[in-house]
Image (cartoon, rainbow, N blue to C red):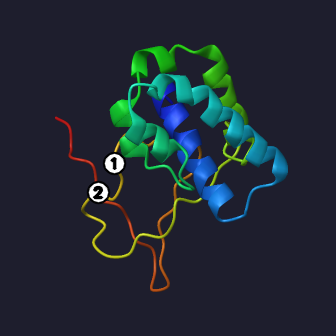
Amino acid sequence: MADLDLILTALAAGGGAVATAMAEQTARDAYAVLKSLLRPYLRHSEAALRELDADRPDRRVIEAHLDTDAAAGDRELLAAARALLDELGHGPATSFSVGTVQGDLSTPHFRGPVTVHGDLHFGSRSGEVRPPASPATT
């Protein structure tokens, strides 16, 4: 995961967990640390600072106003993002479900890079659903 994606993913995951009361106190503390370390990179935008203080910060607003190069280069901020994801169970050795996709599987339902480690299974009650075949190479 790229550094900026790591930071923004941790912010979204932390906001979601804390807003739904699913997080333990250590996760809440890790989320608070991440937000405090992110704050200096949003100084030029009052709207982004207000968004950061929201229960569930909107990643798009934060990213639009974030000093991305400086934030992605901050080792302490990156460590805080990794620590939060680890605390929430989204660390490198953990897998989690994205959800169920219903409907036409021939159109992509994910945006951005998706990396699958291990097996990927598609299935339904009526039988196995197979993803579209890859184009033949000649």
Q: Where residue 125 sits: x, y (%)?
A: 50, 84
Q: Which residue is drawn at 36% across and 53% down?
A: 110
**In this picture, residue 64 sits left or right of residue 126:** left
Residue 117 in which image quadrant: top right
Question: Disc 1 designates what residue?
Answer: 111
**Residue visible at 50% across and 37% down in the picture:** 8
| Residue drawn at (50%, 20%) of the image | 71
Q: Position of residue 89 (x, y in %)?
A: 72, 48
Instruction: Determine whether label 2 and label 1 are within 8 Å by CB.
Output: yes
Which residue extends farthest left?
138
Packing grade of label 2 (10 A; few <14, some 14-19, many >=20) is few
Q: Where is residue 57 in the image (x, y as percent from the top left)?
A: 49, 49
Q: Residue 108 carries which label?
A: 2
Say above or below: 77 vs 91: above
Which amino acid, by three-letter code, is at mark 1?
A: Arg
Is 37 drawn above or below residue 73 in the view shown?
Answer: below
Which amino acid lies under the numbered mark 2 shown in the image of this protein?
Pro
The residues tagged by marks 2 and 1 sit, at their Cα atoms, a distance apart of: 8 Å
Left or right relative to 89: residue 120: left
Q: Which mark is residue 61?
A: none
Closer to the camera in the image, 86 or 94: 86
Residue situated in front as seen by the camera: 52 or 10: 52
**In which quadrant of the rendered image does the C terminus lie?**
top left
Label 2 sits on a secondary structure element that is loop
Q: Is mark 1 on a helix, strand or loop?
A: loop
Q: Give the x, y percent position of residue 87.
A: 76, 43
Say whether residue 81 is visible. Answer: no
